[in-house]
Image (cartoon, rainbow, N blue to C red):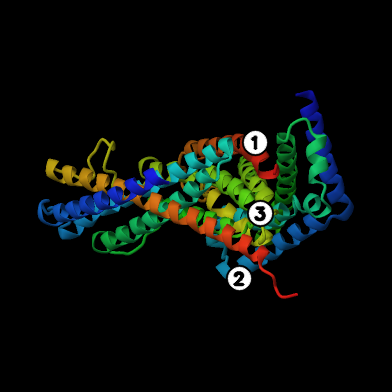
Amino acid sequence: MSSRNKLLPLLSVLASLLLLFAFLRVLFFTPVEQTMGLVQKVFYFHMSAAWVGMLAFLAAAVFGLLYLSRRDMKWDTLTAASVEVGLLFTIICILSGMIWARPIWNTWWTWDPRLTTVTIMAFTYIAFILLRRGVDNPTRRARFSAVYAVIGFISVPLTFFSARLLRTIHPVVFGSGEADMNLNPQMLGTLFISLGAFTVLYAALLLHRSRLMAEQEALNQQLAADDSHYDWGE
Amino acid sequence: MKAWLHSVRVLVWKDLLQEWRSRDILTSMLAFAVLSLFIFNYALELSPINRAEIAPGVIWVVMVFAGTLGLNRSFTAEQDQGCFEGLMMAVPDLSAIYFAKLLTNLLMMVFLAVLVIPIYSLLYNQSLFNQAFFGVLILGAWGYSAAGTLIASMTVQTRMRDLLLPVLLFPLLLPVNMAVVKSCGVILGSVAGQDIHGWLNLLLVYDIVVTILSIMVFEYVIQE
């Protein structure tokens, strides 16, 4: 715990600074896109949130596998924390995408494969949280969480490749051959800074959340132990 | 391998025999399916013109919803009677239990399709007797049962049981739903001749990946 205590403030400060830097750079030091105008700037955070969401779900699946092989509750806490943080960023991604879509596509929502798959991905991980609430026994909860984090991960590559394989109106930034979005070097630089800042933020939030979960669990156990010692005056 | 196959066969036989003696699940599934067809009729205003377009969607949704009734029941007998331990000791490998339950659920879905397709054809005056259509439905039912059996084995051990199954299962079924409905639309000729190989590949890959993944993780679900 002591090494984590030193790492955590450092990560938190670093994440805040990087986020501030990325924010300032997006607002003041990145050129305005010619056809879309100012609203295009939401894209830097939109894509970063999408990236962190998927990274978090990948991490959750890996933590789940680690739990299944090692049976250490530490990995279960990390699985659950990673899913929660990933879900938060996926929702940010969906909402920021809607803000962008309103002026560009002239609608908040459209039934495009990319939009549909990312929302179903969010539902998969909402179901994960419901599953955890439905199991009282901690080790059973840990086993089920790990299994569902692994199986649920199917939705992540599906979301990732949906804009590349299916007919979609969602822009593909990298590896599409034809450039849907022409990013000049300055914009690309901003994008990478934003991606980096969000990744550090993810690491900081993951550690905060898992530490909170672990302490909550420890407190619960202590309360349960105290309860059993308490003489109810019989 | 021989012992594994034998235990799968015995377990499937046991479940089918048990179902045949009570016929609880199949009758509920069938009644629910036919009822849904009637509900769809007035919910969607199925005129002869748009009927052809949405037939694959209606059939598949009816099967998926009726299928959850069967999935919910597929582990309750063992759970309620406390036979899980006995079952786990009886098989050479725990994956045999998963595979047997998968096959039972698949057979129930296929049986349901065999009954629902003529009923639909009769009620809506549109022939759905098409081998390719039936083949895609079976592939879809396989993916559905593969994911559903694993999820059901978890939800039966939770506090919320039946409530949780669709919430956990339906998001995972998105590729199956898309692939079945899109490719059946092309097969039945309601959507102009697109290439359906991509959809069939997706369906096949999903079926195989989910089955293998489930076999690998199943022991963690049922073993304390």
How far apart in space, not on screen, are marks 1 and 2 (Cα)? 42 Å
Residue type, label 1 = Ile
How many numbered marks have been drawn onto this rendered protein structure?
3
- Badge 3 crowding class, 10 Å Cα cut-off, few under 14, some 14 to 19, many 20 or more, is many
How far apart in space, not on screen, are marks 1 and 3 (Cα)? 17 Å
The x, y position of residue A111, in whole percent, is 40, 57
Between residue B207 and residue B186, name the one nearer to us: B207
Secondary structure of the residue carrying numbered label 1: helix
Residue A15 tag number: none
Residue B70 as seen in the image, left or right of residue A35: right
- Badge 2 crowding class, 10 Å Cα cut-off, few under 14, some 14 to 19, many 20 or more, is few
Q: Earlier in the sequence, mark 1 or mark 3?
A: 3
Q: Name the residue carrying label 2.
A: B42
Residue type, label 3 = Thr
- Does the rendering let one see residue B53? no
- Does the rendering let one see residue A41? yes
Instruction: State the residue lying farthest toward the bottom.
Output: A233
- Say if labels 3 and 2 share a chain: yes
Chain under callout 1: B
Residue B188 to residue B29: above or below: above
How far apart in space, not on screen, are marks 3 and 2 (Cα)? 33 Å
Residue A51 as seen in the image, left or right of residue B138: left
Between residue A153 and residue B111, name the one nearer to us: A153
Secondary structure of the residue carrying numbered label 3: helix
Chain under callout 2: B
Residue type, label 2 = Tyr
Q: Residue at x 36, y 62 (%)?
A: A109
Residue B215 tag number: 1
- Say if labels 1 and 2 share a chain: yes
Q: Earlier in the sequence, mark 3 or mark 2?
A: 2
* Proximity of marks 1 and 3: CB atoms separated by less than 8 Å: no
